[in-house]
C-alpha cells in the first residue's frame, strides 16, 4: 500500500487516499492526542464498497 494523498480537516479528522494492488481506498479517520486514530470509514474509490476488512 502507498499513501497517495492526505488532508487534515478541522484539526480532528483526516481524509486519505491509499493506493493498493486492487485499487484505491479512501479512508476517513478521527485523530486525538489522547487516543489512537479511529477509522470512521474506508471504501474502495472505484466501487464505493466497504474496504475495512482489506486494511485491517
Image (tube, rainbow, N blue to C red):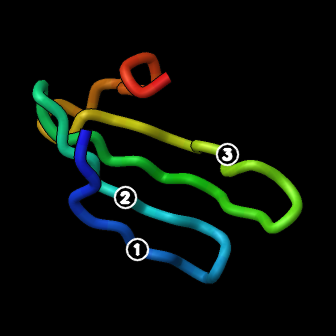
Residue hosting label 3:
38
Residue 15, labelled with which disc? none
Q: Position of residue 28 (x, y in %)?
A: 48, 52
Looking at the image, is mark 2 or mark 3 earlier in the sequence? 2
Q: Position of residue 32 (x, y in %)?
A: 77, 64
Based on the displayed image, in which of its 4 quarters is residue 1 positioned? top left
User: In the current view of this chain or complex, which residue is farthest to the bottom?
Assistant: 10
Closer to the camera in the image, 48 or 25: 25
Residue 7, labelled with which disc? 1
The answer to whether the residues at label 2 and label 1 have Cβ atoms under 8 Å apart is yes
Q: Horizontal placement of 9 versus 30: left or right?
A: left
State the CA–CA distance, disc 2 to disc 1: 6 Å
Residue hosting label 2:
16
Secondary element at tag 2 = strand
Based on the displayed image, in which of its 4 quarters is residue 25 positioned? top left
- Characterize the local packing of mark 1: few (<14), some (14-19) or many (20 or more) Cα atoms within 10 angstroms: few
**Residue at x 29% of width, y 25% of height:** 49
Q: Position of residue 34 (x, y in %)?
A: 88, 61
Amino acid at each position: 500500500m502507498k499513501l497517495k494523498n492526505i488532508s487534515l480537516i478541522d484539526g480532528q479528522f483526516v481524509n486519505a487516499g491509499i493506493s493498493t494492488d486492487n485499487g484505491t481506498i479512501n479512508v476517513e479517520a478521527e485523530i486525538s492526542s489522547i487516543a489512537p486514530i479511529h477509522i470512521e470509514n474506508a471504501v474502495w474509490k472505484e466501487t464505493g464498497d466497504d474496504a475495512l476488512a482489506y486494511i485491517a
